[in-house]
Amino acid sequence: MNKDMLLVIDIGNTNTVFGLFYDKDDEPVFHRRTITRTDRTPDELGVFLKGFLKEGEISPEQIHSSIYSSVVPAFNPIVETMLDNWFHVKAINVNYEIKLPFSIKYPRPFEIGADRLVNAAAVIKHYPGKNIIIDMGTATTFCVVNEKSEYLGGIIAPGLQLSIDSLIKRTAQLPPIVFQPPKQVIGSSTVEALQSGFFFGWVGLLEGIITQIKKVHGVDYRVISTGGLVTVIDKAHKGLFNVIDSLLTLKGLKVLYELNKE
């Protein structure tokens, strides 16, 4: 059997996403996510991942190499041991010192999260030009890259779902809600009031930060977004994002693998 597949892994604070690429492709042929848990053993994770592959009718023997990005350092040795023991591959760990398709114009590059480096790599290849990259994950991050393929820096704001969960957890009488556009701005119930506050509050946060970035760098910057709740916002508030790419981080991992596979 040909070893013709690359396994990419995006380790986030909330979820870990696995993706598989054929060597010749820019789009993953398979991807699944699980909760990031640092109390998992490498064997548990290996069984879990093999179950995913079986579901997709993919043989583990097809995987020839791997690359991962992580913002959870305690999870890294679990993933590396799992890959070594179960798939017999050594993984590339994304950090600012590997080969990147952009230069970093940032005085403390060691502080840039691996997820932000990966997203920038994807944008440089697939959406070259002046870009603001928004990733709505556990945190909401904004990164700016210019037409010279320079990473200029960014902004970190609270995550939307994290904010919802925190408010509900720390208040005695506010019920859990599903993030969705409200029927009207003024809520006629507690649930509608919460939905309105979070929806329009987050639209305002995104619009405000995008506006401030464009004041400094120019109105011709394109806005590229990724993350689970981006599509919910876009459906009800068109024009905020120019491009939505839910697979941006996985694509960026493939880009960085190609640069560093030797």
Image (cartoon, helix red, strand yellow):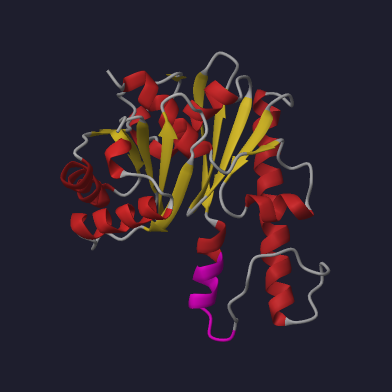
| Range of residues picked out in magenta | 164-173
Give residue 25's position: percent from left, percent from top: 49, 27
Indicate the quadrant where residue 212 lies.
top right
Q: In the current view of this chain or complex, which residue is farthest to the top? A: 148
Of 105 and 257, the residue lying toward us: 257
Q: Is residue 103 left or right of residue 47?
A: right
Q: Is residue 79 left or right of residue 129?
A: left
Q: Residue at the spot x=38%, y=22% of the render? A: 258
Vertical position of residue 253 compared to residue 183: above or below: above
Vertical position of residue 195 compared to residue 125: above or below: below
* Quadrant location of the C terminus in the rendered image: top left
Q: Is residue 170 magenta?
A: yes
Q: Residue at the spot x=71%, y=44% of the render? A: 207
Give residue 133's position: percent from left, percent from top: 58, 35
Q: Residue at the spot x=57%, y=44% of the render? A: 246
Vertical position of residue 262 compared to residue 36: above or below: above
